[in-house]
Image: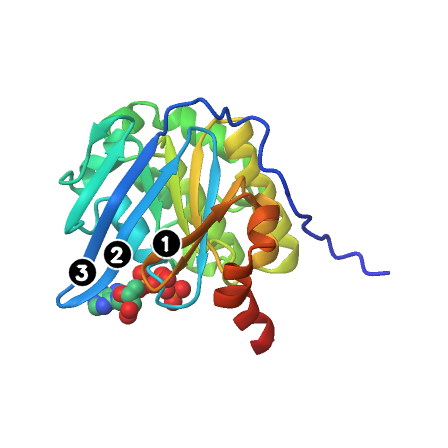
Amino acid sequence: MSNTPTLTVNPHGSPAVMDSAAPLLELESVTAFYGDLQALFGITLHVKPGEIVTLIGSNGAGKTTLLRVVSGMKNPAAGVLRFSGADVRRVPAHEMVKRGISHVPEGRQVFPFLTVRENLSLGAYIPRARAALKRSLEEQLALFPRLYERMNQLAGTLSGGQRKLLDLVRALMAEPRILLLDEPMAGVSPALRVELLRHILELRDRDRITLLIVEHDLDFVMAASDRVVVMNNGRVIADGTPGQVRSDERVLDAYLGARRAAA
Ligand code: ATP
């Protein structure tokens, strides 16, 4: 029998999320363009405090664009974008970080010629986080022993999975209320996948951080999500618990079926 840890499906979502809670993040009829190319067509999406929502969909579906709109890296052309009840449609990215939105884009974002400690310090650049830097650095490292052991190592010498952890912890240094993760599982070894999943669930359960995640790894999506939102050609085509989405014919046709056929 294999000793490789496995991820199990979370069919009903988290019991910690209250149905009656006001949304932390609200998008209504959001559109976005790259020049003449329309990437988002009227996206409506609500994320409640304490939820882990994952966005899935085929390549080019608009998932990354949606994260970029939420973090202020890309302006929506039309629609409503609210965070914690406030209109943030025209708020720039650096201001979004101060309001509590941290975004970990796809790919490796570490500074390779700086140490792990220096990379983490750079994550705490907003005034609130800077004031609490020493405490939060120690608190975070106590929770991530793999990084603690490598505090004085150059980030460029870390493995792919360890860099993912560093990306994650650096974003946490800004003390976010919502964390946007673009493909956190890409390039991560099987053992570290399980560890990363545990950290992500702890962020929700222990730190009350809300997460909006783009991910192609369906095992992770099914294990981590309270809610799964399926996108296709710039539109939301399904939104439900992992169990609901897995049995939705439209999802099977538009996405899961295509992936199964390709496998
Ligand atoms: P993937 O799973 O491959 O990362 P995605 O669902 O994240 O895809 P997006 O990256 O948001 O999709 O892309 C949505 C559409 O916008 C695609 O048609 C893509 O080619 C286009 N697009 C994305 N970024 C740019 C850009 N910088 N300039 C022009 N077009 C872009």
Color theme of the render:
rainbow
Q: Seen in the image, is 86 located left or right of residue 21?
A: left
Point out the quarter of the image occupied by ligand 1.
bottom left
Q: Please name the amino acid that badge 1 sits on.
A: Val
Image quadrant of residue 133? top left
- Mark found first going from the N terminus, 1 or 3: 3
Residue that sits furthest to the front in the current view: 249
Q: Please name the amino acid that badge 2 sits on.
A: Phe
For image coordinates 43% across by 66% down, the residue present is: 58
Image quadrant of residue 190? bottom right
**Residue 93 visible from this viewpoint:** no
Tag 2: Cα neighbours inside 10 Å, few (<14), some, or many (≥20)?
some
SS at mark 1?
Answer: loop
Residue identified by numbered label 2? 41
Q: Please name the amino acid that badge 3 sits on.
A: Phe
Numbered disc in front, either 1 or 3: 3
SS at mark 2?
Answer: strand
Q: Are marks 2 and 3 in contact (CB under 8 Å)?
A: no
For image coordinates 48% across by 66% down, the residue present is: 254
Q: Seen in the image, is 113 located left or right of residue 97?
A: right
Residue identified by numbered label 1? 110
Q: Nearer the viewer, residue 252 or 93?
A: 252
